[in-house]
Image: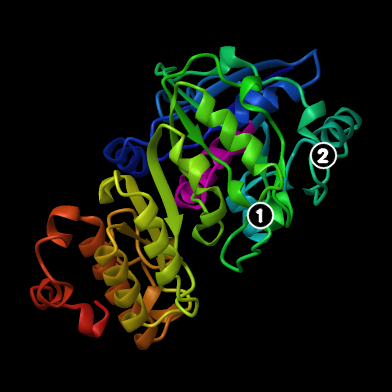
Amino acid sequence: MKALLITVSSREIKKIRSARYIKFQQCTMPYLAALFPENWEVEHVDEEVEEINFGKTYDLVALTFHTPCCYHAYEIAQKFRAKGAVVIMGGSHVTLVPDEAERYADSIFVGEAENTLPDFFRDLKAGKIKKRYDDNKIVDLAQAPLLQKELFHRKDHTTGTMFSTRGCPNACPFCIISRKEGCASRQVADLNDFYCGQRVIKLLDPNLLACPDRERLLLQLANCSASVDFTQGLDIRLCKDVMPLLQGIKIKMLHFAWDNPKEDLTRQFSLFAGYDTERNFRNRRVYVLVNYWSSHAEDLWRIKTLLGLGFDPYVMLYDKYKFVDARGRWLPGVETRYTPEALRRFKLCQHLQRWCNHKAIFRTVAFEKYLYGKRGYDDGV
């Protein structure tokens, strides 16, 4: 039996990742490959660095993808289903919108797949697979097999990626983490389970500072020689008590988030800036959510406050893929799905994102002046 695992990446997303240096190894498929029965011959295609050979035949094709790649993933699925392969899907987008995703697959996996893959293979052998495999249990990674590193296809192994914790207690309504990984931050690995001398560590923990074992994990990072990129964001509200430990870590990049404008985090960011006097704004990035539950005035207030405190705000535009394509152009029929007011609001947020995230413009031109040179935002076209 032959299986193809695909880490999906569309052409547009590859350009974005290349521009932002988001090139580190994705571990999902090499890890899930270790859960396949022994009689399966497993191949992996990482679209970030290679192309799919649609001329080959497989019994099973599995895809994992994020929302920006969903339409590309659906096209891949249709091609392989037309060739007679069983197609399964998983990942954050599938968990968020399973009713949509299951139209394009023979089976989908909602939540983590570790607990349900054995059920799927038993059903496949019996010829009666289910349309959907749901799992809301916490995965015990201590019992999980090691990922198959021979299925890595990216050449840069000087950077390592790891989770030391999973889960988040915040349960933000716009975020999938609590639904997918649980409403508590818990340790799943020590640094020595992963670290073997890499120069850079990309830490993917969704909320490390909420973990009861945070001090021990931070001390492990401080005692290694690697530079650490906290890619998923530290909770600024929990930083005060661990600042001495953070200062002991060789930090490459800090990420925070200020998603809720109703919660004034000015004092917390100001306290952190007072502790962290050596790092400049380029190494202290803050994600700012827009087009969700904030007004334009609240968006600008957060951005300008962060700028004044010495942080680098980075605008995250919610539901962008529902309005525009990868090049920022309106999707066909968008005017029938949204009110003119919603379209104007989105276009204003889109201009705000372009202004703020283009740092050369952001630090030299006020938003009002930037917007004055733009046409069309006022009528949503």
Query: Quick check: can you spot residue 164?
Result: no
Whether residue 302 is in magenta: the answer is no
Residue in the picture at 39% in, 68% down:
323
Q: Main secondary structure of the magenta part?
A: helix
Residue 285 image position (x, y, % from top left): 35, 52
Residue 79 image position (x, y, % from top left): 54, 37
**Front one among 206 and 33:** 206
For residue 287, above or below residue 297: above
Residue in the picture at 23% in, 84% down:
379
Q: Quadrant of residue 114?
A: top right
What range of the chain is rendered magenta? 62-83
Report the residue marked by disc 2: 116
Q: Is residue 324 shown left or right of residue 191?
A: left
For residue 33, above or below residue 359: above
**Front one among 297 and 278:** 278
Q: Quadrant of residue 124?
A: top right
Query: Mark on residue 168?
Result: 1
Mark 1 nearby-residue class (10 Å; few <14, some 14–19, many ≥20)? many
Looking at the rendered image, the quarter that the C terminus falls into is bottom left
Q: Is residue 348 shown left or right of residue 342?
A: left
Type of amino acid at the residue the image marks with label 2? Thr
Whether residue 82 is in magenta: the answer is yes
Looking at the rendered image, the quarter that the N terminus falls into is top right
Q: How many marks?
A: 2
